[in-house]
Amino acid sequence: MAVTTRRKTLMQSMVADSRVFLRIWNMESIMVAVLKLKVVLIFLAVPSNTWPTDVVKVYAIEGKEVELFFDLGTDVNQDVLNIKHKQQLNSTFVDVISVKDLKTIPVASLFEDYKSKVTDLQVQNKTITMKLSNVNTSDAGLYRCIHTTDVELVSCGTLLIVVAKPPPPDLKIVSGLDSDQRIPLGSNVTLNCFYRSRTSPADIPRCYKTKFYDERNRGLPVPEGFKFGYTNLTQLVVRNIQKSDNISITCKAADILENFNGTILYSEPSLKVDITPTYGPDEGSIKFDPPETSVTKDEHDLLVYTCDADCRPPCTVSWHLVQRNGSALELITSTNTLKLNVSRLYHGTLKCVASAKTAIASRSHNVSKELQLVVQYVESPKVTVDSLETNQVEMMEESVGTLTCQVNALPAPNITLRTLDNDLMTVEGRNPTVTVSERGYTNHRYTASTTFKAPNCTSRMILTCTVTHNLARVQGNQIILKLLCPPRRATIEGLELLDDYEYYKGDQLNFSFVLIAIPDPDVYNVTSELNGSFKIEQMPSDVEISKETNYEGNSAQIKYTFVCHRVLTSADSGTNFTLHFKSDHFTNQFSFSVWATEITALTTISITIDTVDVTSPTTYVEYKTKPPKKKSKPTYVETTFNTIWIVIIVLVVTVLTALVTPVTYIIYKIKQGAKQSSFFITRLSEVTKSSHELPSKPFHASETSL
């Protein structure tokens, strides 16, 4: 397609299509703001009028067909000429068409190299018409009629300008970047669309127009105030970059040629340039999911928290545990998701730390947000008695002690101090002692104390405490009181340790008794004293003492059996024995006296009156030694029996005296009655002995005469 010069000029077109006004921006610079501006026209600084002016300019679009006209004119001095072509001003002409018989009827022929390009060649009325198909930039340039003498034929030629589609321009940011080549917040960013023309010849005057587009393919600037604008007619500026800005810009370019009114060939879009600010995190940009900044969890629960930070480029997010001194951080995970098996190690402050990948001027590199984690837990309480934590604590009976219960728990529990049977006191935990272990565990120790009175040593007491907590009801350790008591006499009937004991002459002393004592005492020494003479009894040759602990199931009762291996005589009567006891905690001694006893006379009288045989035994005992301090009283049967026989004897004697009975006869009857009554008296004595406690040695009556 050929376009002649009969067109309005470029500047006329610009004035017709645009309105231009000046505006002062920021009171610092003057800029040209073009409203409804569709193109930005830039004149290239190329030499003008370098090509011949006597030739016709013909414009052709790359890839299309074009006709070139050559007017040979009438003033032809030679009969032969060539139409030659050169692409650039400084290149050499190349033959295209040979024309002969100029003075008559011209004949034109193509040179070999152009036969494939020229689709039609005609000569008519001194005018040569040549059609070129599929025009490219190498076809552009000056086509000139030149005689064989290298004389150019005036006004015979064509300047072919091939308008080609430019390659995609290079869009670059030329200002507004920081030292890291990133866009900081609040900056003004200037972009330049670098254009490369393919229109040929390259040295003809031209201009180009550029278009800028946003991410929605809208031409810029758009009516959004002064967010977008031009610093000059070649650059686009994006002002006051904010976090919300997420702009992608491309540009296109096209050649604009004077007197060319054909289709404008825009390039393909440039690679996009993202106008996104680079910024690091700030406290307001860190978000938790769930959003709470304080959470309470039971020990061994699972805690899941997500931390996200608004950063560009994305930050590195990690979770840390704040050390108890508040300075050092201990890494938990290097991801933004916290999955934690909760333990007391993590009680306190957890930090989400967002770190910018590159240092950003005037902004903090790291920003953190805190999560307060409260870990609920309860441990088994520790029970002490008088600060002793052992399973068994020794105490004097009926003394006062202090029961203490300490529990490590959060939140505060209720503490009940108690025995196995009764509650002593219940209190709510207050004012805990907070410590941190070497492993980093936070401890909250609550303490409750009360006093108590120990029972006597024949009783039993077990102390403990119970903790009632949100998580569980927990029992503390048990402490058994080992109640100490010095040896003392028990009050068990028949097993009391007496002050006096009887023995029979020639017999061994043997008896048992029970003492109350904890711990069990041993007899380490036995002494005896008689009439001021002191003696240490040899054990076990002289005396032997055996011991039976836990008597009748009572740990405080000990049964002892005392055996004197020496044969005691009447000379030993009144001996005072002392038993010396000793245990780990106590020493004590107990004394008792022994007394000998014997029977000196027994008289039996049997009287038969008429046909009734009356047997009247009379028994009496004479002590040759001092009677015991504590001696069993005669039974009622024995006393009555003796009284009756005495009365009978008195009556019998009176009757016999009155009747003057022959003495021999009476004596004979008495002897005979004695023999008959001997067996009766013996049996009566055995029955009497069984009715009250007498020494173990058998009782034998002796027969005497009156």
Image (cartoon, grey):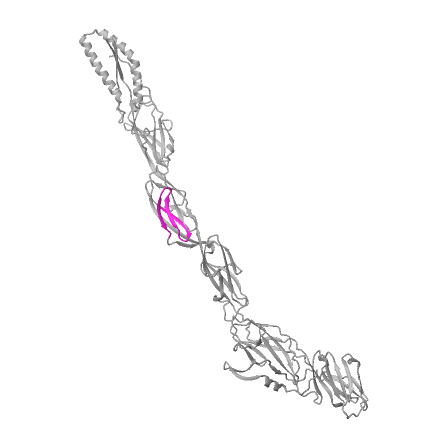
Residue under the point 28% across and 19% down: 599
Picture coordinates of residue 49, whole percent (x, y) = 67, 88
Can the viewer see residue 92 in this picture?
Answer: no
Which residue is more in the foreground, 304 or 622? 304
| Residue span colored magenta | 402-429
Task: Report the quarter where the N terminus lies.
Answer: bottom right
Q: Main secondary structure of the magenta part?
A: strand
Q: Is residue 579 visible?
A: yes
Q: Residue 531 at what x, y percent from top left?
A: 27, 27
Vertical side of 700 occupied by 107: above or below:
below
Residue nearest the observer in this picture, 356 or 64: 64
Image quarter where the C terminus lies is: top left
Q: Residue furthest front?
A: 124
Q: Residue 704 sits in which quadrant?
A: top left
Q: Is residue 421 magenta?
A: yes
Q: Residue at x 79, y 82 (%)?
A: 111
